[in-house]
Amino acid sequence: MKKQYKQQPVVSNDWPPRIGQGLFFGRLSVVDKQDLFVAQTLHQKSSWFMLKGQIDKVVEMCGSKEFNVEDILQSNANSSPLVVAIDGAAGIGKTTLCRKLLNMWANGTLLHQHYDLVLYCPLRNGKIVTAKTLSDLFVCQRYEVPMVAEWFEKRNGEGLLIIFDGWDELCEQYRHSSLAASIIRREQFDQCSVIVTSRSYASSSLLELSSLNKHFEVTGFTEKEISIVIIKTLQNDSKLAQELIDYHMHMNCYYNHSDHCVTSDDIGLQEMLSNKDTQLALKLIQDLKMRSDVRSLCYVPLVLSMVILVYSKEGGHLPATLTELYDNFILQTIRRHVKRQEVDPRTLGSLSSLPSKLAKSLQELCQIAYINLVEAKMAFSSHQLQKYEGAVKEDFFGLMTTFIEYDEEKYQFLHLSIQEFLAALWIARYEKKTEEVFKDHFDDDQFQLCLRFVAGLTHLEHESYRQYFNKQIDVQCSRAPLFGYKATQRSWFHRSSEIKNNSGFISSDSNRNFPSFLLQLIYESHNANLCQLLAESVIGTTLCLRKVRLSLFDWLCFSYFINNSKLTWNHLCLEELFDQTLSVLTAGLTNKSLKTQCKRLDVKLWHPTTESIHNFLQSSLFYNVQECYCELENGQFVPCLALLQFFSTPLLKVLHLTLHRRSLTSTSYQDEHIELEKTIAKNSTLQEVKISCSGRDNQITVTIDSVIKGISRNRSIESFVINISSYPPLPPPLSNQSIEQLLKDNNTIQALSINIQDKLFPSSSLHISKVNTPLTALEIGKSTNILMASLIPHIKGLHCLILPEPYPLHLLFLSHPSLRTLALPLDTAESAIELFTILQTNTTLEALKLWVRYENICNSSMGTSLQDLLAENQTLKSLEIEGYFHNSFLSFLSTGIKQNSSLQQFTLKHIRLPLNEEVLQFFSVVAGKNNLTELEIYFKLDNEYTYCNYEEKECFMTQLFYEQGLPAVTNLLQSSSAIKRMRIVCDSYSSSEPKSKDFVIMFYESIFTHPSLEYIDICTIYNASFLLQRILKEQIKALVKMHQQKQPHKQVPIVNVECIITDVV
């Protein structure tokens, strides 16, 4: 077999022409299963943004990184057998990668692992799919095969590597019950290693398998690599090609370092630039810049090869869609074929105008493609093809290739996508009942690409196609509700009914509901009428792309759809856009008619430039946006110019803008800062502004000064939140007058939140003499002590006050007798007793948050005072206690809560594990309170385990959380009848699996049978989250059925399992 693997080429076909001189499949990235989950739940950059083309920014921070082919089989720490999933788009090089691995094993260059045998099993092969024994998996049958198979069977597969190529080509039945599926799930031959490849759309079932060790994605070519491949392919002179690559990089088409640009005179490349091949390559690169639709497909090597071929053959003409590309490629292939028969290929103008003889042969070839695609057959024997005389005579136009299977010659198309296009051609041109066939295969995942081609060929003009686009689609944002005090606090500073909250999204069906396939059909058909029909079917005219996996091509389809939807979108949540994605989206939003608009925009732009921000906001779609929640992350933008763009939006009412930069700017932009101040001052629509800045930026304080000065003169803004943190070297401090001027000159701001590092203030104190702003809510951040000391004495009559440091309580309530929301730290038992005593008779405070700084302040006197507060005060609705206290302190809380009738929301951080009698009594009291509808509980390992090592902590936490924490919560739920919302946080080391799942299942059963529970959050770290989510997924059908039987009229509760990275403080 080594001999066979050595002889077969890594790239199996010479048509379409090979490209890139060794760049077979672009880049390979790996996503660790644990890190992937963390990235999912924290909504950071995840591997999803590398799928199928979003690859120019494969960032380390999302748990993904580039890997060499040699490292795919690098073993884990325990050297256990591997199960590796490799996915990617059609034509991106998954099979080529498999061939590369086979070649490396045959030549002894496969590092990290020694395998006695590597077995290649293409899942398009029917005998592989229906195999019953290991012996059946040997494609090449020889005398020794049974003995070799028996030897591996006795060793349970040890020393064997099996490569299953094409999971997506298996039907649903065989994905569940086949020898291949059993081996992948480690149900058989559990000591062998496995690699399984799949197209991305079908890989989700693979990634859910508990047996999976690693997940790799073949990510294709980057934009830079696309240019290199074009140059190397079109410029046959290798020396000229390298010179052109160097010149092209210097001219900086991709890195935007204009001060390093050079001219052709500088490096003597005039002769090289006059070369025809060079000119063609540069023209294609430039044309792809203008045609981002086609460029968005070129990350796939097969497609890039076709584009280069079609472009060069058609004199510099780019196809508009994938259908046009394949149509032209098939035509070029037929022209190439007839040229050998001494027929002038120039007489063949299109596939629809072929001479009758060739047309008949093409029709037969399309029939072969369709019939076998329906039967999920991708390989055919010669006797199956004999009846297609015309196609056989024309040697299938060179669109098929042969291989040997069990000593029998078999045929297959050069690539599955070519078979899919020809099958589509049969459906669209030769099938009498095109629309019925389309309907029959609409829900078949394996027919998706084929139906896209049908859309491109028919333009979906028949009336019957409307039925797929007028069904209601729900892709609204699913946000986790804010609990208790946090909800009350935010209501003071954010007038919007729903605000951007990075950690506030919950697991939903957005990815499943998002109509990616419909958008692909619309784009391929270029039927603008269907855009409006689909848009009108979207519930609430709201589209949320949070957690939706989109390729660059999907973004292209999305932009075409939005651009032609011709309505006003209430909300577009675009999630995270990298520079390449942003370019594709912006290029597609070209409608200047203002018929398509957006009221609210949520977006995070990665690596934006001042120009890309400008181009994005200049789209007519966002011209009349009223609410904008935007994050600018790690970009090469000028802060004041970016802010100027946003503040110039004419109808903007709410702006939440986060800027993060790590670069220093030498230009002062003095005039632009003055313009920014004037623009903000004269803005008459803004009501709410939140600016957050972090990173390393020497210009940021100058920019924020301009913002503050502009807001000082503004007469419409009612809420202003400013957060600034900076890394060394620190920028110059804010000006002396900016904060003073804001408080003195502005007469509209009612809610003010300031969190600015003390080091960014000009001196150790501020000179605030007068406050004219009509403040009702004030928040001072934890790092802003200077402001607190200078500002608090000058403000009276607040309804909401959030302080980072203790403040004399008698002065506080004297100045603010009508406080309704209060948050402050407690650093002595005396101050705590004073506060609780005051609040016993207070009749205005509704929400209270306390930070208990030291455990020793929680003495019996303080506990009794807190107990009396809860017993006497009947207006407090929300209470949050955070910090250092022992479980024994809960007895005071239990007694107080038992006598309280007003408290509706309660948060307790932290309950220590192991639990004691006081905790169980507390849970019992809480369960019996009908007024308490929201509960947050934070579990933490007790201080007695502080000096244990990591493994010991993990062991203790696992046992205590699953055997004490969850059962206690389960009992609470079973005993309560009023709780509607609940949040459980376990922020310690519970990352290993429990001995039994019974406690988890009982916990879930208590949720789904609860009479009032509507929503529950479960937040743990790493594998604990994965375990809880996995068990929920396994049990969900049974749990929902149980719920419907016991409570048929109650809505099924929402269960959101999240992951946290670090301990919650």
Image: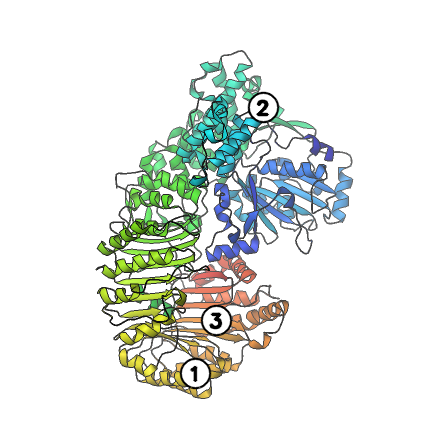
Question: Which one is in front in this view, the residue at disc 2 or the one at disc 3?
Answer: 3
**Sequence-first tag of 2 and 3:** 2
Q: Residue furthest bottom?
A: 861
Place of residue 1063 in the rendered image (x, y in percent of width and height, measured from the top left): 51, 67
Marks 2/1 in contact by CB < 8 Å: the verdict is: no
Closer-to-camera residue (299/284):
284
Question: Crowdedness of circle 1 by 10 Å Cα count: few (<14), some, many (20+)?
Answer: some
Per the image, the residue denoted by label 1 is: 828
Distance in Å between CA atoms under marks 2 and 1: 89 Å
Disc 3 crowd rating (10 Å Cα; few below 14, some 14-19, many 20+) is some
Residue on which the image places disc 2: 385
Q: Which residue is mark 3?
A: 938
Q: Nearest to the eye among marks 2 and 1: give it.
A: 1
Between discs 1 and 3, the one toward the N terminus? 1
Amino acid type, mark 3: Tyr
The first of marks 2 and 1 along the sequence is 2
Image quarter (top left, top right, bottom left or bottom right) of the N terminus: top right
Task: Look at the numbered discs 2 and 3 and tell me whether their residues touch, using CB distance below 8 Å.
Answer: no
Give the colour scheme shown: rainbow
At label 1, the amino acid type is Thr
